[in-house]
Image (cartoon, grey):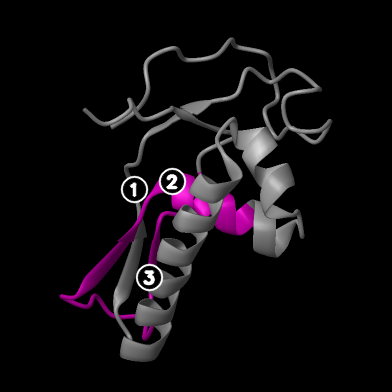
Amino acid sequence: MPRRQRCRRICREPIFMDFSSDGHENEDVVVLTVDEYEVIRLVDYQKKTHEQCAQQMNISRTTVTEIYEGARYKLADYIVNGKHLRIAGGYYRLCDGASACCGGSCHRNTAEGCEEACCV
């Protein structure tokens, strides 16, 4: 019996959710999950290590690596093949906005409390 999947903690959902390579709607859509987006944001944009990313998202380092590899493949597919990119879904919960939750750099404006139920 497989282990139960841990809910991944993210600071906020992305502001922009849909991207088109040529400004037109393409029938081929690549779906990047919100947790994949968060790993890309933390590792590539904020230059955090996989270990730091794992700690912030409350998952293991190996899980971060697996998510990262899948996300990079999807981004490459979007760029190389000119597909439409959509960020949606995933298995995550929003952080509680506390200063320590995201290493003191939380993007949440207020501490609304963690959402106990994960999005699916």
| Amino acid on which the number 3 mark rests in the picture | Lys
Label of residue 88 in the image: 1
Q: Which residues are magenta?
A: 14-41
Left or right of 79? Residue 27 is left
Q: Quadrant of residue 12?
A: top right
**The N terminus, quarter of image:** top left
Left or right of 67? Residue 119 is left
Residue 55 visible somewhere in the drawing:
yes
Circle 3: element type = helix
Label 3, on which residue? 74
Q: Residue at x 67, y 45 (%)?
A: 53
**The C terminus, quarter of image:** top left
The span from disc 3 to disc 2 (Cα, nearest Å) is 13 Å
The span from disc 3 to disc 1 (Cα, nearest Å) is 13 Å
Label 2, on which residue? 34
Q: Position of residue 93 (x, y in %)?
A: 47, 26
Q: Badges 2 and 1: C-beta atoms under 8 Å apart? A: yes
Mark 3 surroundings within 10 Å by alpha-carbon count, few (fewer than 14), some (14 through 19), many (20 or more): some
Mark 1 surroundings within 10 Å by alpha-carbon count, few (fewer than 14), some (14 through 19), many (20 or more): some
Q: Position of residue 71 (x, y in %)?
A: 44, 63
Reply yes or no: does residue 5 show up in magenta.
no
Q: Quadrant of residue 30?
A: bottom left
Q: Residue at x 35, y 67 (%)?
A: 85
| Amino acid on which the number 1 mark rests in the picture | Ala
